[in-house]
Every structure is written in C-alpha cells, then in structure tokens.
Amino acid sequence: MYGTWSYSELQAECKKRGLSALGKKAELVDRLSAGQAADSAALSMLGAVSLALAGLTDNSRDAGAVKLAQRYAAVIDEAEVAQDALNELGPKLLAVLESLGATPKGRAALTIKGGGAARGGAVKSEMDELRERRRRAREHGAQAVDTTSSPSHA
C-alpha cells in the first residue's frame, strides 16, 4: 500500500502515527506496514483475546478453554455479518474468558475464592488447602489426626 507513496508522504504519515520518520524509503514503508499490521491485530477479536490470554500464567491447565476462546474469537473475526456473530458467540466468549480469569468479573471471582490476583496466584484446590493446613500444623507440633490406623474398640 505504501510502496507508491512519495518519500515526503511517507515521512508525514510516520510523524502522524508517532513513528520515526528517519531512514530510507523502504525502511519507512516497512515501518508503516508493520504499524498497520499491529493496528489490524489490535482491532481483531482474536488479537484482543490472545493478548488477554497471554497475561494468564498457567494456560496449560486450561488449554481446552483457551482454545475455545480463540476459536470463538476467530469465528467472530471471520463472520460475514459481524453483528450476528457477536450476538451469537459474544456471550459464550465472555463466559469462557470469565472462567479463565481474563475479565474483571472473572478476576474478582477468583480473588473471592482465595486465588489471589487472578491466575497469578492460581486458585487452590480443596486438597491443596488441606495439605497446607496439615503442613502448618506439623510445624507447630500438632499430631496428625487422620492416620490410617483405626481406633481400637474394646
């Protein structure tokens, strides 16, 4: 697109976009093209979802949900009638993102459950919490109350 522009037009466009206007014509074309690609990615639903999911620390545990969110986003981007796709898939995508802690509501729910600041402090399972309580009790000299031996009845 920018290949047919004059050097002065390229410089003006670079300045307008806050990019460096120094360099050869080919460098300015590359710089503007890269900026346009980044703008397009930012405008796509898949780009936005990928950016949100990149901030999560443990995607491996949630690979299925991550893939589902990315697929919903891609379908929305590729739809011929974007509004219909958003009406149909938008709520589903939002629900998946919330379950992953990738929305303010999802992060708040994770924090309430004791997970710390959204996935960074990963939600602890009940078993993890039990193990932690047992560890603390041992450190304070408490005896185990859940041994495998049964009490004797005489």
Image (cartoon, grey):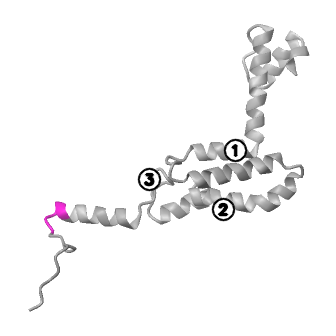
**Residue that label 1 marks:** 48
**Residue that label 2 marks:** 95
Residue lying furthest left: 154
Is residue 21 left or right of 82 when viewed as pictured? left
**Image quarter of residue 13:** top right
SS of the residue at dot 2?
helix
SS of the residue at dot 1?
helix
**Image quarter of residue 30:** top right
Residue 53 spot, x, y in % from top left: 60, 47
Residues shaded magenta: 138-142
Task: Residue 49: say if magenta.
Answer: no
Residue lying furthest top: 24
Q: Amino acid at mark 3?
A: Gly
Q: Residue at x 56, y 44 (%)?
A: 55
Residue 61 spot, x, y in % from top left: 50, 52
Q: Earlier in the sequence, mark 3 or mark 2?
A: 2
